[in-house]
Amino acid sequence: MGGSGDTAISLEQVKADLVKKLTDNARDLLKKDFNIADNTTNLETLLNRIATSKFKQTYNYDYNDDATKLNPPGNLGDARSSSKICSIIPPVGTQATDYLKTGVFRRVFPLYYGVPIKLNLPDWMEKTAINDLSNIANIIISRDTGKEWRYNQYRRTYDARKEDQDNYMCNSIMVYCYGTLVEDGTKAELAIIYYCGVYYKVKSETKATRDTLQGSAYLGASKLADGSVPTTDELLKASLDTYSKNQFKSQFGYEYASVPPDSYRAKGIDSAFVTQNSQLNYIPDTKTEDLENYIEHQVYSGLNIPIQSVKTAAMKDTYDQYKSILNNASTDSWNQTRLDKTYIPTDPTLNPIRQTGIIMSWYDHKTTDGQVSISVTYIYIMTMFYECQNADQELAAELFKILCNNLRRHIQGDSSGDISDPAKLKEFMKEYSIQEWKKAFGFDYQGRQSKPPKMKQGGRVEPYEELLQVKSYPATKQEVEAWMDAEVFRRTDRKFPDFAMGPVYDDIVNSMMRYGSNEVPKDNNWWYTADFTREYFDPTPQKRDIQQYAFYLYALGDMTINKPGTSGQEGVKIKRLFVYYLGLTEPHSYSPVSTMETGDLASGSHSRYSTAYPWFYKMCSYHECIHILLTGVPYSLDLVNLTQIKHEDMNDSSWRRTRRNV
């Protein structure tokens, strides 16, 4: 070079010299480790002989690119094989991983030795297998080996851990080298991996262990039913069907899938439902991911439960029972759980629903030689749901009739309807409230067509007619606000201008709380009425004032009915509160106000209440419940003219009330 006229050696020449050196070293290794002399100058051929010889030495069977000619120990078939060379020019980067993905694990390989090579591993293990070999490859070629060839052997069993799949065994050899060569200042680097490997199906220790555990469950079930030993899950279910039917009759006194004696069907009401189902669930390794889905679509899809709230509650109870069994299972024995629960629908017009049934469960576990924990759980359910007779419910229905009759007697005109239906009571409450509305406010209630006397021409009204039902007395503010948000409107809705939205909401909630609690004294079994008005004044020049009219009809029923044959100390305690609300509000109407004769100028509002005390009635329910029916109309005024509130007592033998008139 320079003045001497020498020519610098090229990088390609240095690479060729490096490959020749690596080839010579591979030939020497083949002779040294396996006593095989080979004069070939083809590096891939030498590496193939080294890898296959090392493979035979390590795994005690011959490697073959034709997988049909492989005979690995314990092979159940489905063997897959592959051999391939990969040259990598450092830095390594992702070349080793890419080589394995595209060269070893790709779906269809080109022809090697005239044989089509395929390595179609099952989806459940392919990603793990690629990651395993990629990690090894990246490690072994990350350091300079001084142009010396080395081996890596990798053996692993991939456990399917599923009853319907066998394991796969991996046997592989990697022959690798990382060499560098510097000639006249020119440096060449080269990393080479030669891979040959086999994947084949072997007997799953997990599956064998699971089969043993299932066999124990079958044997235990045969002892329960005193029959032959089941050999499949279908036969196991049949055995449990036989045993559980006998247990069901012993527990409840009637045959499974018959008409229960305490059902409404037994009273001759053919429309009353009776439904039943039995299911066997096999749960490996206490896995609960699909448990909720199984209960809904296997157990309860076969149960015709027409009341969705009851079905939802029962599914949750069954899920909790299954979870409890999985969390507290006893080992290697069949255990029995009794099911007996009555569900009360939230709708008081519906009959109670009773569930009866038997759950049989079995659990056992074992650890394999490979330290894999295996468990098997069987849960069998045999259950019925039906409309049941209930003394409390029947008494409540009779008292609803009395209540409807009492209210209907005070409604002008003809108020027809089936008074045995508790839902009819709401209609009567609305009829009576509309009737009394004009007496309280001086104009007819006609929903959106209502015309308050001071309403601006072209204004509109917003009517509300709602019924609150809660299972407690007195009602809590949380219950009232939840009902308000769901059935009427939310505090954050834009029903009215900002200055009125919060106060209108609060007035309705506070009134519901007032009549749904102990704040207003109520004699048991008497009806009461109350009316309420309030103006909400717009502080802006727009003067979009709002007025609300509201009428309430409410009563607290409270009775104790002695059970037959008792001393009077035992009885059914019934308590229920009804509050019906009828209200009108007119939103967003322009209505200037010049003066206000009475009221609270500081707050910009004025309100008035009146209450009345009505007739005696009796009513009961299976459970304590509050009913509040709300009807109201807020609207805007052209002029406000309020006078002093007056009181007048009216005497009536069946209806006593105090009215406050404007």
Image (cartoon, rainbow, N blue to C red):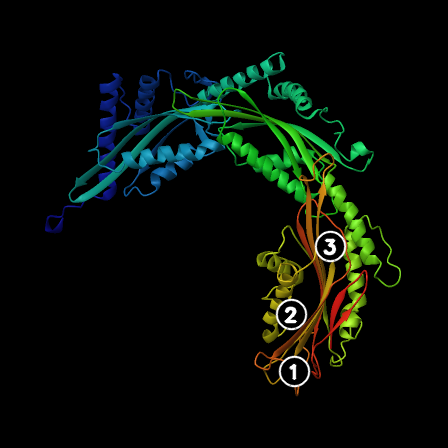
Which quadrant of the structure image shows residue 517?
bottom right
Can you tell which of label 2 and label 1 is closer to the viewer? 1
According to the picture, the residue beneath numbered tag 2 turns out to be: 495
The disc, 2 or 1, on the residue closer to the chain's N-terminal end is 2
Crowd rating for badge 3 (residues with CA inside 10 Å; few <14, some 14–19, many 20+): many
Q: What residue is shown with label 3?
A: 525
- Residue 355 lies, in percent from the top left, at 67, 34
Identify the amino acid type marked 2. Answer: Lys
Sequence-wise first label, 3 or 2: 2
Farthest residue to the bottom: give it.
594
Instruction: Give the amino acid type for the residue marked by disc 3 in the picture.
Output: Asn
Q: How many marks?
A: 3
- Residue pictured at 65% horizontal, 82% vertical: 598
- Quadrant, the C terminus: bottom right
Q: Quadrant of residue 560?
A: top right
Q: Can residue 151 be seen here?
A: yes
- What amino acid is at disc 1? Thr
Q: Are marks 3 and 2 in contact (CB under 8 Å)?
A: no
- Please say if the residues under marks 3 and 1 sit with CB atoms less than 8 Å apart: no
Task: Pick whichever, 203 or 413, lies toward us.
Answer: 413
- Can you tell which mark lies on residue 598? 1
- Label 2 and label 1: CA atoms lie apart by 27 Å
Tag 3 secondary structure: loop
Distance from the alpha carbon under mark 3 to that under mark 2: 37 Å
Residue furthest to the front: 567
